[in-house]
Image (cartoon, coloured by chain):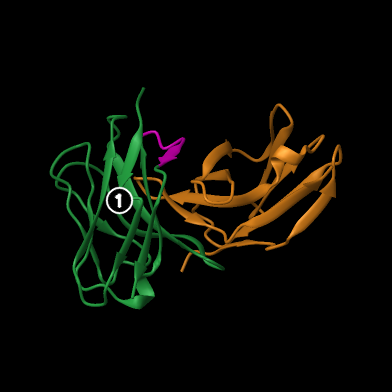
Chain colours: A orange, B green
């Protein structure tokens, strides 16, 4: 059984701060790693994906991957109230890139 | 613009009835997926398809079936709806490269 674990939160940070979201996974054969954002009542939307160990930056978002520790994180710099959402970590495997999701971390950015 | 749509958006049905949820994508993606989302469980994979005539079971496939007769559609059927199948259902599609799955707007299903 492939497992993806996230801190359920909720996580609250003040506006302008760095939000740190963490995720661990059990399947060492996992190939790629994704962070989705989901606003209440909406569908998930992709923020970032990462394949290789290290950091990947996109604007205010940085994904970090450590395959040896089976650990993925997402940093959000200069957090804004519009970043308030549930963040889902997902791990892909198989030819169709089937995703296994964590249960999500609810983030609230306080003005 | 390419998109992925689901219908109906809301459905109330009774225990034991057959229900079909539609998913249609115009991305021309080979891969399509059905997930359910419940509080405390995140998104769980029900079925997926690599392409026409191909279907595969996911983590929580019991009580569900899919068929893929063309590239654009992957309908999800609940053969005999149960209260435990009350959930929000998301359809997604992705290309062979697998960099991103695009999600539909979701269907909220209530089984009474």
Which residue is painted at 52% across and 66% down in the image?
B41
State yes or no: residue B99 in magenta.
yes
Q: Quadrant of residue A50?
A: top right
Which residue is painted at 30% across and 76% down in the image?
B82
* Any part of residue A89 in sight: yes
Q: Which class describes the residues within 10 Å of circle 1: few (<14), some (14-19), or many (20+)?
A: some
User: On what subunit does the disc labeled 1 rest?
Assistant: B
The quarter of the rendered structure image containing the C terminus of chain B is bottom left
Q: Position of residue B63 (x, y in %)?
A: 26, 71
Q: Which residue is mark 1?
A: B8
Which residue is painted at 60% across and 38% down in the image?
A52
In front: B34, or A27? B34
Left or right position of A39 against A13: left
In front: A28, or B30? B30
What stretch of residues is rendered in magenta?
Answer: B96-103
Which residue is painted at 46% across and 35% down in the image?
B99
State yes or no: residue A94 in magenta.
no
Name the chief secondary structure element in magenta: loop
Q: Position of residue A36 (x, y in %)?
A: 57, 44
Determine whether A21 is above or below B19 in the image. Answer: above
The quarter of the rendered structure image containing the N terminus of chain B is top left
Left or right position of B1 against A14: left
Determine whether A82 is above or below A12 in the image. Answer: above
**Residue lying at the far top of the rendered structure:** B1
């Amino acid at each position: 059984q492939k497992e993806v674990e996230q801190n359920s939160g909720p996580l609250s940070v003040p506006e302008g701060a760095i939000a740190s979201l963490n995720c661990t996974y059990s399947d060492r054969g996992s190939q790629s790693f994704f962070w989705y954002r989901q606003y209440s009542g909406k569908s998930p939307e992709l923020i970032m994906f990462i394949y290789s160990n290290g950091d990947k930056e996109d604007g205010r978002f940085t994904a970090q991957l450590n395959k040896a520790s089976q650990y993925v994180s997402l940093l959000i710099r200069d957090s804004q109230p519009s970043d308030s959402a549930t963040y889902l970590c997902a791990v892909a495997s198989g030819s169709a890139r089937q995703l296994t999701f964590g249960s999500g971390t609810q983030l609230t950015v306080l003005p | 613009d390419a998109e992925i749509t689901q219908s109906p958006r809301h459905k109330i049905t009774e225990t034991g009835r057959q229900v079909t949820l539609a998913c249609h994508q115009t991305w021309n993606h080979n891969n399509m997926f059905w997930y359910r989302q419940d509080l405390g469980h995140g998104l769980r994979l029900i079925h997926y398809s690599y392409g026409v005539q191909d279907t595969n079971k996911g983590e929580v496939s019991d009580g569900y079936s899919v068929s893929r007769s063309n590239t654009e559609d992957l309908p999800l059927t609940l053969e005999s709806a149960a209260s435990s199948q009350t959930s929000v259902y998301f359809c997604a599609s992705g290309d062979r490269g697998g960099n991103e799955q695009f999600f539909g707007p979701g269907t909220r299903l209530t089984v009474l």
